[in-house]
Image: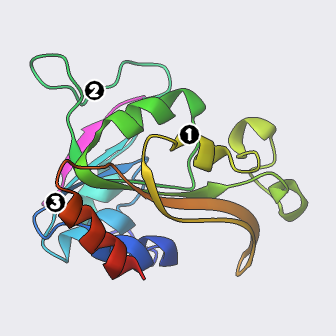
Amino acid sequence: MVVLLKASDWIIRWSHLLEPDATVLDVACGSGRHLAWFAGRGHRVTGIDQSVESAHQNVPQAELVCADIESGPWPLKEEDGLFRRFGAVVVTNYLWRPLIPTLIASIAPGGILLYETFADGNAQFGRPSRADFLLQPCELLRACAELHVVAFEQGYLPDPPRMVQRIAALRPRTDETRLQNWERQAL
């Protein structure tokens, strides 16, 4: 068994916004630390990565998809060709800009995007250091313009030292009462 790292504090902090029966997609799931976190709270979880062996060992109940999402087609489509939708899409420590619209399209109405990754300025602390893998100021905020942003942060985090950008953003649903209830929970 691979040792799981603790779930991201950002993911933990905003996970209360998920519906109790929400499905969760963890993109670039690695060893499955966030799959384990959400599965432990009763959510059905799906992980996608180039290698899913360690995630399978750590979270055997997860649906795991082994795919190269940077050079291949998006593998999570329905029979009608539309993207599968999830109650939450989770991404940490991963950035492939061409995929961001697909991730947003994969959020079900009333679902949430929880995203946290490295930002401009991280090179002073180590890797990643290439601009291709670092978000520019407010880049996630701009990418989520069609979503309802509940929380957004960018800047320095001390442990370990790094520059990050992170967002919690909801896809609006037609039931405004439910969205207002989520907003109250976030406060």
Q: Quadrant of residue 40?
A: bottom left
104 on left or right of 127: left
Give the quadrant of the N terminus. Answer: bottom left
Distance between mark 3 and mark 1 Cα atoms: 23 Å
- The secondary element bearing badge 3 is classed as loop
- The secondary element bearing badge 2 is classed as loop
User: Is 77 or 36 nearer to us in this picture?
Assistant: 77
Residue at position x 29%, y 68% in the image: 180
Asked if the stretch drawn in magenta spans residue 64, the answer is yes
The image shows residue 62 at horizontal and vertical percentages of 18, 56
Residue at position x 13%, y 25% in the image: 78
| Residue ID for mark 2 | 75
Q: Quadrant of residue 101?
A: top left
For the magenta stretch, what is the residue range? 61-68
Distance between mark 2 and mark 1 Cα atoms: 22 Å
| Residue ID for mark 3 | 22
User: Is 21 or 67 nearer to us in this picture?
Assistant: 21
